[in-house]
Amino acid sequence: MPQQPVAVLRGFRPLRRVPLIMGILNVTPDSFSDGGRWLDATAAVGRGREMVAEGAAVIDVGGESTRPGSRPVPADEEIRRVVPVIEALAGEVRLSIDTTKPEVARAAVAAGATLLNDISASLHETAAELGVGWVAVHMLGSPATMQQAPHYDDVVAEVAAFLAARAEAARRAGVEEIWIDPGFGFGKTLDHNLSLLKHLDVLTDTGVPVLVGTSRKASLGRLLADSDGVPDPVAVDDRLDASIATEVVAAHLGAQMIRAHDVLAAFQAVKVVAA
Ligand code: HH2
C-alpha cells in the first residue's frame, strides 16, 4: 500500500537567529497562570533574576491581568505594582512593560523599561515620544468580552493585515523598533489559534519581527482535553510540554521572540531548533 504523504511544516528554512526569550513576570493578584505569586516586589525581583539566569533576554513586567473576563486596574495601582520591580531589575536585563495605558508606559520607561508590550496595539505614539520599542498585539474586542464567540472570515489574512497596518502607522510615527504579535487567545477560538500558528510564516514574511505568546494558554488545555477524551481542560500547570511544542513551531516558522513563563525550557527548545 502506498504511504500517505507526510504533512511537513511549511516554510522550513534556516533560522536567521536564535529567538529571544521574553520571561513573563506578572505583578498581579489575578493573572491566569502566575497570579498572586509575584505580587510582592521582592519575590517578583527574585523571579526576574531567576529568569535571567535561565536565559531570558527580556523580562516582561505586567501589573494588570488581561485574561478573558479580567477587570481593568486603575493606572496608579498598575504603576505602584510595576515600577519598584522595574527599578530593581533595570541595568540587569532588558525590561518591557505589558500595559495599554500611556501613563503606565511613561512611568515604566522612567523606571528603566525600553519596550512597550501593548495588547491594545494603540500606543505607538507613546512609544515614539518615549523613544522605546513597541510590540503591537492583535486582539478582537477587549479582555472582558473577547472570548464571546469571536468570528473572522479569514483569521490569518485579517490578523496579518491589521498588524501590517499598525506597524506602518508606528513607522510613520517614528518608532524605530517594531514587533508584531498575533495575540494567541485574544479573541480567538482554538481553531483560530491553530491557524495563526500554522501560518505564522505569513507574519514572519512581512519582515517585521514576530513575537509569539502561547505559554500555558487556555487553548492548549482545551486541545489536550479534546485529544485524550478527558472532558476538562488540562490544568494551567500541566501545559508545559504543549507550550514548548507551540514555541518550537513558532521558532521554526521564524518568530524572533517567544514570551514564556517556563524560560529555561523555552530557551533550551529554541536553541535546539536553531541548531
Ligand atoms: N499574553 C498575555 C499578556 N500579554 N503580550 C504579548 N505580546 N503576547 C501575548 O500573547 C500576551 C501578552 C496573557 O498572558 P499572561 O500575561 O500570562 O496572563 P495575564 O494576562 O492573566 O496576566
Image (cartoon, rainbow, N blue to C red):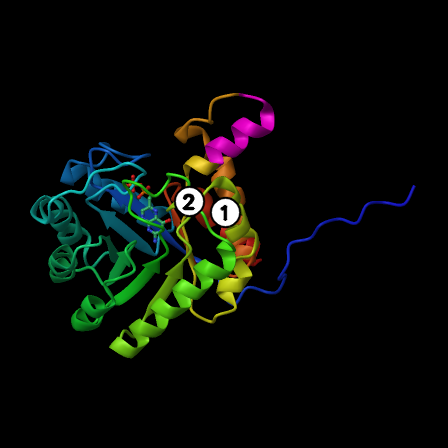
- Vertical comparison of 2 with 134: above or below: above
Image height of 218 relative to 156, above or below: above
In the picture, measured across the screen, residue 240 lies left or right of residue 126, that is right
Say if mark 1 contacts mark 2, CB within 8 Å: yes
Q: Which residue is mark 1?
A: 192
SS assignment at label 2? loop
Q: Position of residue 222 (x, y in %)?
A: 49, 31
Q: Amino acid at mark 2?
A: Pro
- Is residue 226 a member of the stretch shown in magenta? yes
Considering every residue shown, the one lying at the far right of the view is 1
Q: Could you tell which of marks 1 and 2 lies nearer the N-terminus?
A: 2
Q: Give x and y (percent) for residue 245.
A: 54, 43
Residue at figure coordinates x 29%, y 35% from the top left: 34
> Where does residue 60 sit, x and y in percent of width and height?
28, 51
Task: Count neighbours of disc 2 (C-alpha within 10 A) and say few if under 14, some if 14 to 19, many if 20 or more.
Answer: some
Q: Position of residue 65 (x, y in %)?
A: 25, 41
Which amino acid type is shown beneath numbered disc 1? His
Height in image: 49 above or below 29? below
Look at the image and tell me whether residue 82 can be seen. Answer: yes
Can I make out residue 256 in this image? no
Instruction: Residue 226: name its quadrant.
Output: top right
Residue at which label 2 appears: 150
Mark 1 nearby-residue class (10 Å; few <14, some 14–19, many ≥20): many
Q: Secondary structure at mark 1?
A: helix
**Number of the label disc, if any, that sits on residue 44:** none
Instruction: Locate residue 127: give its quadrant.
Output: bottom left
Looking at the rendering, in which quadrant would you find the C terminus?
Answer: bottom right
Q: Is residue 233 left or right of residue 45?
A: right
Q: Residue at x 54, y 21 (%)?
A: 230
**How far apart in space, not on screen, are marks 1 and 2 (Cα)?**
9 Å
Magenta stretch, residue numbers:
220-230
Which image quarter holds the N terminus? top right
